[in-house]
Image: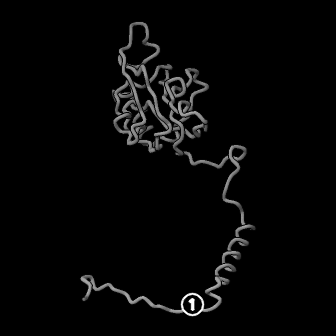
Amino acid sequence: MTSLSNRSKVVSDKKMSFTERIYLPGIVKGMWITLKHIFQRKATVRYPEVTRNFSEIYRGRHVLKRDDEGRERCTACGLCAVACPAEAITMVAAERKPGEENLYREEKYASLYEINMLRCIFCGLCEEACPKEAIFLTKEIVKADYKRDKFIYGKEELVEPADPDKRIDISKRQTPDVIKFKKDKKEKHNE
């Protein structure tokens, strides 16, 4: 009976020599590879004492940005949560009350904004989906912990400080076209 694919191969039944049966060449070859690697430079880094250099567009911990006047940019549109493939973002929208104009940029804001860092895959799709440029990924590493609830970051961990001197620089994450667009005051987005 012939096979339908005509890809059959003849398997050789070659007898092993005495040295192959006692696996001596294989053991010597394995020991030689091990000895070579002992004297090579180590690939691991002793984190946190030593940190590696990250690229300018490294995707680390999230930050919710403020505008130039110190107001939160997020308008709770939910596009970041919809774009997140890991479903790590949760938000609840609320209406801005009279007198809160200096806190929130638009009439609607996120009263609850949480990111589950254990689910997040740091893909950056939330950053791309945001029409108000409110969420960005920074160069900071998410700190390790033993408790799962410490990895659910709320607004207190995500919103950057109101002090302009302590703001997080995300200019390297923006392309020149985006920066040029932001400077154009004729666009409604930049009002």
Q: Which is more toward the observer, 61 or 6? A: 6
In the drawing, does residue 55 fall left or right of residue 6? right
The quarter of the image holding the C terminus is top left
Residue to which mark 1 is pinned? 16
The quarter of the image holding the N terminus is bottom left
Where in the figure is residue 168, as x and y percent of width and height? Answer: 56, 31
- How would you rate the neighbour count of disc 1 (Cα within 10 Å): few for under 14, some for 14-19, many for 20 or more? few
Above or below residue 84? Residue 75 is: above
Q: Secondary structure at mark 1?
A: loop
Question: Looking at the image, which residue sits at the far right?
Answer: 39
Q: Which is more toward the observer, 128 or 171? A: 128
Above or below residue 80? Residue 10 is: below
Where in the figure is residue 43, as x and y percent of width and height? Answer: 66, 59
In the drawing, does residue 44 fall left or right of residue 127? right
For badge 1, the amino acid type reads Met
Question: Looking at the image, which residue sits at the far top?
Answer: 98
Q: Residue at x 35, y 39 (%)?
A: 83
Q: Which is more toward the observer, 51 or 4? A: 4
Counting the numbered discs, the total is 1
